[in-house]
Amino acid sequence: MVAVVVLFACVLSGLAWAARRLRRRGGGGSLMNPFDEIWHPVAHQARIEAEAADERPAPSPLPGDRLVRGPLPERDTGTPPQG
């Protein structure tokens, strides 16, 4: 009986350690997804939407859009430069 309790405690502490380590490093989302889906469905849904946003391509420029290369020009505020 004691061995079962010790084994259960070791498994739970190992999962908690793995979750902290993987979340800190930013990886392991696929490893923790089943647990998030069961015990924290809002976090699971947010992760799915964030992954989908990462995979979306950048919007294409529309016909007639100016192509800007380099830094944007400074805006004229109407005040003379100080200096």
Image (tube, grey):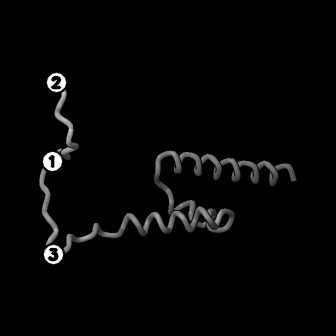
Q: Is residue 52 above or below residue 12?
A: below
Closer to the camera, 26 or 10? 26
Q: CA distance from mark 2 to mark 3?
A: 41 Å
Closer to the camera, 19 or 47? 47
Residue 52 falls left or right of residue 1: left
- Disc on res. 73: 1
- Disc on res. 83: 2
- For image coordinates 38% across by 64% down, the residue present is 54
Where is residue 52? Give x, y as percent.
42, 69
Is there CB contact under 8 Å for labels 2 and 3? Answer: no
- For image coordinates 20% across by 73% down, the residue present is 62
Q: Is residue 30 above or below residue 70?
A: below
Question: Which amino acid type is shown beneath numbered disc 2?
Answer: Gly
Specify which label sits upstream in the sequence, 2 or 1: 1
Q: Is residue 55 above or below residue 15?
A: below
Question: Which amino acid type is shown beneath numbered disc 3?
Answer: Pro
- Disc on res. 63: 3
Where is residue 74? Give x, y as percent.
18, 44
Mark 2 or mark 3, which is nearer to you? 2
Q: CA distance from mark 1 to mark 3?
A: 22 Å
Identify the element where label 3 is drawn: loop
Is there CB contact under 8 Å for labels 2 and 1? Answer: no
